[in-house]
Amino acid sequence: MNLNDVKDLLSSAAQEFLARGNHRMLIGGQWVAAAGGETLEVVNPATEAVIATVPAAQPADVDAAVAAARRAFDSGPWSRAKPAERERLLLRLADLMEQNGRTLAEIESIDNGKSAAIAQAVDVGLSVSYMRYMAGWATKIEGSTVDVSVPFMPDNEFVNFTRREPVGVVAAVVAWNFPLLLACWKLGPALATGCTVVLKPAEQTPLSALFLGQLIQEAGYPDGVVNVLTGDGIGAGAPLTRHPGVNKITFTGSTEVGKLIGKAAMENMTRLTLELGGKSPVIVLEDCDPAMAAAGAAQAIYFNQGQVCCAGSRLYVHKKNFDRVVADLASHASAMTIGHGLDPTAQLGPLVSREQMERVCSYIDIGRQQGGEIVVGGGRATEVGYFVKPTVMTKVDQKARVVQEEIFGPVVVAMPYDDLDEVAALANDTPYGLGASIWSNDLSRVHRLIPKIKAGTVWVNCHNMLDAAMPFGGYKQSGFGKEMGRAALDGYLEQKSVFMAV
Ligand code: NAD
């Protein structure tokens, strides 16, 4: 199946965009090829067909993009744009994203594999609401006045106040699991605060960022305020995050690459936000209805094919209900319809790439080798396309690799426990700390457990719920800094103190 086979399922706007075949990237308001002509192929993971090529940016292109962002930040209309103008532009961009929601969702689906219907509701829906939320903050960035004493100059008068100023040129490097949404998590606060951006989408999923680049131009952003640099980690990501002209790096991706970027950032003292991997526990307490727990656990792991940083990939069930919850979860998994993202009946799409499919399948094998038992699923689902069966594994040791390491696919490991302190210790026993969910109506137990969990987000009787107003980020090796909520602005602002003798 190639693009022609699914063409009829696409809107005319998505067809028109994809018909370009050879795409260009956005630097300084111009759509350009890589200076050296290098390109990357973009593959539809449901069909394995090449659907586009994009420029593979190299260090020379990175220099050009950073220079364009620098010019836009230092001089020109954006450097003089008032907060109300930044608000107006973000609202305009949100409107355009909403109007083009179906196209964005279809592009995301054909590029990443995810369901177009879910992408429109979740990926586009959250992106639009986040841009509107951040538009509101553009006019509410405030410093403070500070009454100072200066003990060694008791007879003098001083005035002290603080200003919040945009940090400057932002390098935004993102992963492939929610390409549009992750880009908006960076662009929203950057544009609200007056920064300029070089956005590098993941090499597997560059298309929605290119379409977004068009909407950014249509919204009326001056040239160079947002630059979209397509390319891989070595050619584009590494030189961008090492670039001395970058003032802040905001990165969403693996902990492994996050550490490399962190080291590079220290060289230039570049400001840094890291949103990294996770191995989030789903904790089912003794009182929880097993059917509700199983449905919740299925949603927690299988949403977006398990390619969610906070996916509920470890399931801890009180031993009283363990067998029942695992059996119900296995029924949910085996009932899921597998299919491509434009098929409205499909409940589970392909993984993003052959590499990711092979990685997930190799983890399933490692789990088996370390004594794990496959209750359902357990490998590749189709001959063509990167589909992996929704999998439930039991009888794994807490120290097994499938319990400790992020698999990033539709694979959950289920384990029984005895009491609250034990499950808190097990939940915290990985290097990660991104999310966790607790399933119970026993308020007292829930409240006793919440403070014990070392994770940036704890959900109760739900999982994977996000909102523009909710700060989101990791504890431990899941990263630092927050996306969303008021807290996200801090990563894009410097604080300047002004001390005046009067
Ligand atoms: P990845 O770290 O391999 O790649 C992420 C991005 O970094 C890509 O754009 C890639 O090109 C770039 N990159 C790769 N090597 C680089 C280097 N040396 N220097 C600079 N940039 C480089 O991650 P991935 O496999 O694309 O994404 C999956 C990971 O992302 C998972 O670990 C997942 O948990 C994490 N993630 C975290 C969050 C969060 O909010 N915490 C959200 C989504 C995904």
Image (tube, rainbow, N blue to C red):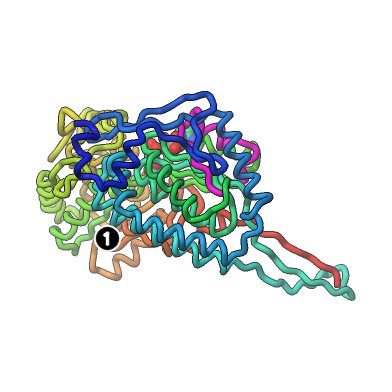
- Relative image position of residue 462 (x, y in whole percent): 27, 60
Residue type at numbered disc 1: Cys
Quadrant of the image occupied by residue 424: bottom left
Q: On the picture, is 153 further left or further right than 94? A: right
- 364 is higher (above) or lower (below) than 74: above
Residue stretch in magenta: 225-247
For residue 190: magenta? no
Quadrant for ligand 1 reads top left
Residue 15, quarter of picture:
top left
Q: Is residue 30 visible?
A: yes
- The residue lying at 13 percent from left, 44 percent from top is 337
User: Disc 1, ligand 1: is the CB inside 8 Å?
Assistant: no
Residue 217 in the image: above or below residue 16:
below
Where's the C terminus, which quadrant?
Answer: bottom right
Return the residue at label 1: 462
Q: Position of residue 121 (x, y in %)?
A: 28, 57
Give the residue displayed 17% in from the left and 34% down from the top: 378
